[in-house]
Image: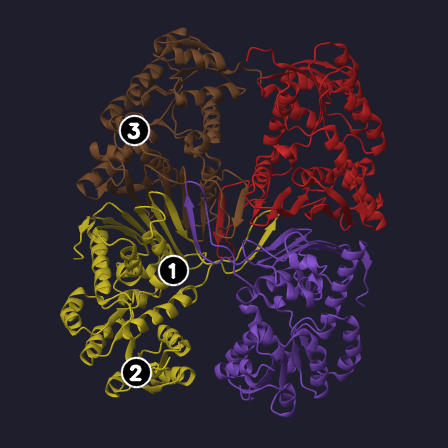
Chain colours: A yellow, B brown, C red, D purple
Amino acid sequence: MTERPLRFGLIGSGRIGQVHAASIAAEPDAELAWVADPFVDGARAVAAIYGGTATDNADEVFASGQVDAILIASPTPTHVDLIAQAVDARIPVLCEKPIDLDISRVDALRPRVLESGVPVALGFNRRFDPGFSSARARVAAGEIGALEQLTIISRDPSAPPASYVAVSGGIFRDMTIHDFDMARFFVDDIIEVTATGTSTFDAGAREHGDFDTAVTTLRGASGTIVTIINSRHSAVGYDQRIEAFGAHGTLSVSNMPTSLVSLSTATSVEGKPPYEPFFLERYSVAYRAELREFINLVRGRQSTSPTFEDGRAALLLADAAQRSATERIVVTVDLG
Amino acid sequence: MTERPLRFGLIGSGRIGQVHAASIAAEPDAELAWVADPFVDGARAVAAIYGGTATDNADEVFASGQVDAILIASPTPTHVDLIAQAVDARIPVLCEKPIDLDISRVDALRPRVLESGVPVALGFNRRFDPGFSSARARVAAGEIGALEQLTIISRDPSAPPASYVAVSGGIFRDMTIHDFDMARFFVDDIIEVTATGTSTFDAGAREHGDFDTAVTTLRGASGTIVTIINSRHSAVGYDQRIEAFGAHGTLSVSNMPTSLVSLSTATSVEGKPPYEPFFLERYSVAYRAELREFINLVRGRQSTSPTFEDGRAALLLADAAQRSATERIVVTVDLG
Amino acid sequence: MTERPLRFGLIGSGRIGQVHAASIAAEPDAELAWVADPFVDGARAVAAIYGGTATDNADEVFASGQVDAILIASPTPTHVDLIAQAVDARIPVLCEKPIDLDISRVDALRPRVLESGVPVALGFNRRFDPGFSSARARVAAGEIGALEQLTIISRDPSAPPASYVAVSGGIFRDMTIHDFDMARFFVDDIIEVTATGTSTFDAGAREHGDFDTAVTTLRGASGTIVTIINSRHSAVGYDQRIEAFGAHGTLSVSNMPTSLVSLSTATSVEGKPPYEPFFLERYSVAYRAELREFINLVRGRQSTSPTFEDGRAALLLADAAQRSATERIVVTVDLG
Amino acid sequence: MTERPLRFGLIGSGRIGQVHAASIAAEPDAELAWVADPFVDGARAVAAIYGGTATDNADEVFASGQVDAILIASPTPTHVDLIAQAVDARIPVLCEKPIDLDISRVDALRPRVLESGVPVALGFNRRFDPGFSSARARVAAGEIGALEQLTIISRDPSAPPASYVAVSGGIFRDMTIHDFDMARFFVDDIIEVTATGTSTFDAGAREHGDFDTAVTTLRGASGTIVTIINSRHSAVGYDQRIEAFGAHGTLSVSNMPTSLVSLSTATSVEGKPPYEPFFLERYSVAYRAELREFINLVRGRQSTSPTFEDGRAALLLADAAQRSATERIVVTVDLG
């Protein structure tokens, strides 16, 4: 490669920011130029390991003239302004999901993004999971014929603290949003949303009028039905599965085994350890692939990075699900 | 055993009637005394193999004074009258599902059944499947803690002929009815039904305003959510699975392998033949267990045979699902 | 069928005799005519359930003129004389394995059997197991190309009593004999035997100079190597597996699951109950298929019943393994 | 960490040398100081990516005074002299297996190594595979009681070129050597070796009097039997499995799946892609763990690195197997 590697400005040095920092450092065509976090010690710690200059002020990153791409890994309420800032500075941006919890703020930002022509990608990392992307490619290649049903099982290992639930926007906007994007990854003509939610185990969810357990049904115009089964906890570990049922067969993506060792005894056959604890481990390969695809986008090559529009569509589905689950109605959507 | 085996009168000598005839013949405490079918050659063929007297007139069976139990395996529209006849004759009866496609006919029969005290059992054979009954017993024993989600996947191998669809009462009353009973087998406080149906591959379903693909969500008063995923066809064969997700773990019932042999090659690992073709094969053990449990009921022993009330509840859920899927609303149910 | 069913004379009413009696009773073209056992109460109990006349004297069966086939399920030391008696009476015979523990007695009987032309079949039931017979047929059909390695894992659930070990002829003649026949079922040019045995857990084996643990290697003239791994006990239950490794792939026959239910928890994924307890359960289908194939033989139809020569070859291999394991040498065999 | 990272001198820049270079570069407490290879372009390429100074002369590495540890990844015939050189220079050394193909050269080197007290580790990387090391730890922890049988299946994806076979020392010294070490990892009292080899598919093996297919049986003094099943090719990919059978249960280590996606169709259930192509992919985690453990050894911390004695014992077993397979005898060994 004769080009200089892309210089990244990373906004946010928390858990997910660190994941992206490591991906950037490991990628030949990327380097970490700046890390910004109001909690500047966090930014410094990341810069010490992965390179770049630390700052407590994201404006400095934009002003530096030293970044070719922005990666937004800061709290959700900051996303809209940072995307706007990047777009105005004509710097391509990869933003963690969701764009915002409020669709009106997203819609207000939307024309600015679309008209700018600046690449804006959304961090729907699961599209880059080797299992899910392979299943989707094989569906697209016709291996199972027409896709008739898609079942997504998505359960977190344990419920977040009540304080997080309070500002999360609810299970559909916070957690199911990934599954809504996955649904759209497979089915592109969703027109209807029905959701049922209950709170059976999490006091935090109950306290804040949220659900800890939810099932959402999406209907495609051509007849495909998507079922999303969510729980905020899972005794067996992070439970992430997909089953694509088609006219000629079924493609299943199972959980990732944590060990190749199984134990058989007089009382049990094939006892194995439970699954990967959470998304950082489960989707480690996906995060790196996501970054590479974003680099393709920035470099002007063909890219499958999810777009701003994908981020908006997922939020529209989340809003519809929230309405369906609380008002007990079936909600029609126009993802246009 | 010092008692004489129970003498069965079998009404109906079709496919399912033959299954029951074989079970009766194999059971030490049962014998086939009469077989009635307007198509008397069918009745004769069954009697030739499994014993008993053949007739083209079910009345003759009731009039004979030679039967201790009635097994109704005739077409659905005859069920209500035959149950009434058995109850009036004070002969215990095991009736294939559904009681009827019309809840008003069921409700009209209901007081007569309940007041009679005559044992009336419904043929929800899947409750007696070793896998499903074991999973339910283990849930009841608390192995996975509180049951939070139940996912039922139930797909037939291939769509029935259009002529059958026309009189079937629709996918929910004809096919999902088994899954509604299975849902109630695990969750006894269902209060709400949401269903989404489409017709994507079966011209017969489209022609008759029916669905070939459906997803139904049931909500329990205490928060458990049941998801039922149906299709009228399945390339891989009869697809019958259950996943019970609880606070402390998950119990999964998988499909029955048709072979212990797997082939691994340069292009595939673990290729196996597909699943059992259909219900007669898949549930052969269940049919025999169902009969034994009904014999317990007739003998006055403790029995878990599904009741007339179970049959009615499943139909109420089917009616609610039909309404939800066609009117696009969420339907509240009172299973009393 | 216009012919009268074959009338069977069963010699021996113990555990395996009862299995055969049940198979005979269930088979349309067979009926139980006589049951002989010096312990006449045993014979009577079998006859009461499955039909036929009981006697304490096998001679009476032969003299009756009422049997079309003899099934020998009596103790091993009686086999040679009973086969001779059947052959002389020109009655086809199915004899449980082994023919005898002493090859010289087998060789003395051999010309009488071969010259008589009377069908003599050996009870190597495992050839009729659906998994093993399917794997063998698929190997023969070339699905995995040339067979290069065959691995047989064969472990009993628990060691027999010391009194049984004392008269068993040793692990190779008593237990591995089945695996030797299975080896020959797949590989027909075995020329060399190497065996290693130890006694690690069974006091009875140690006391009688026998092994409780053994590994036998067989070499085929064309290069195929068969490995047989035996143990007299297995905590997980009856362990019966085969792996056929060929140039183009591998065919594996796994153990039969005892349940379709698996439990996943925070500490374990896929806990299942252990395997079928022992051969009566594991090979129940095989015993019935074995009988049907013997009926084909008696009826003069094409048949794959193992022959007297198969019985002799398995014993030759067992003798060679015994010599290899005790003298610590590699033994060449000529199975002719 | 306040200490300076260990400076490594890498001898050999071929396939396995590159693996170690990458591990060294990724390890915080290690850095690549020198790379030596007579093919100096290879050394230069490795140094360009992973750091260090390239040379065509290993003597320069030893003379530099700039290395804290030597990693020998050069061809087998150079190992003995390089170990001697490292020991004399009192530099700890990690040497790829085998020490040499000739036990007399190993024995000649042995006192020099043992008397020097310089840490010499052997590259038996499989001990560090998460599956195998976990299984061994669980056996040691008593999870399956006394270990009675160990079955090692080890098949390469495809046979090496005839030119390689000619100088490989034969399948036992070249390939099974890993399995002999694995056997000793689980069983420490091996006293006897029996091996059977054939050449069924590889013209190179036949040409050079080698085997392409082999089964080796090892007997432990306390009765454990180890079976090693080898093939020089495997249609399904690199086949690396272990089954530890104990008094109370079985621990199985399966192959690593290459995908979480499975396809079920009308003709096949659960078709998956085949296994990892070869050792670099299969054991990538193990190579890194091996290096970390060697660093522990160099740092004077507790370490489980395999020793020179382990390397010699594996070669003794290989020699015994070679003799057993060619002379058709059972060979007693003294691993003292």
Viewer-nearest of discs 2 and 3:
3
Dot 1: few (<14), some (14–19), or many (≥20) neighbours within 10 Å? many
Q: Secondary structure at mark 3?
A: loop
- The one of A252 and A5 positioned closer to us in this rendering: A5
- Asked if badge 3 and badge 1 are on a common chain, one would say no
- The one of A235 and C40 positioned closer to us in this rendering: C40
Disc 2 chain ID: A
Query: Can residue A247 be seen from the camera position used here?
Result: yes
Which residue carries the number 1 mark? A156
Q: Can you say which quadrant of the picture contains the C terminus of chain A?
A: bottom left
Left or right, residue B101 beside residue B243: left
Disc 1 chain ID: A
Which residue carries the number 2 mark? A38
- The one of B114 and B54 positioned closer to us in this rendering: B54
**Vertically, is D196 above or below C171?**
below
Query: Can residue D302 be seen from the camera position used here?
Result: no
x then y, percent, for residue C52:
67, 13
Please name the amino acid that badge 2 sits on.
Pro
x then y, percent, for residue B246:
42, 50
Q: Secondary structure at mark 1?
A: loop
Q: Residue at x 33, y 56 (%)?
A: A212
Viewer-nearest of discs 3 and 1:
3
Q: CA distance from mark 2 to mark 3?
A: 67 Å
Please name the amino acid that badge 3 sits on.
Pro
- Asked if badge 1 and badge 2 are on a common chain, one would say yes
x then y, percent, for residue C133:
59, 36
Quarter of the rendering containing residue D92: bottom right
Which residue carries the number 3 mark? B161
Disc 3 chain ID: B
Q: Can you say which quadrant of the picture contains the N terminus of chain A?
A: bottom left
Disc 1 to disc 2: CB gap under 8 Å:
no
x then y, percent, for residue D137:
63, 63
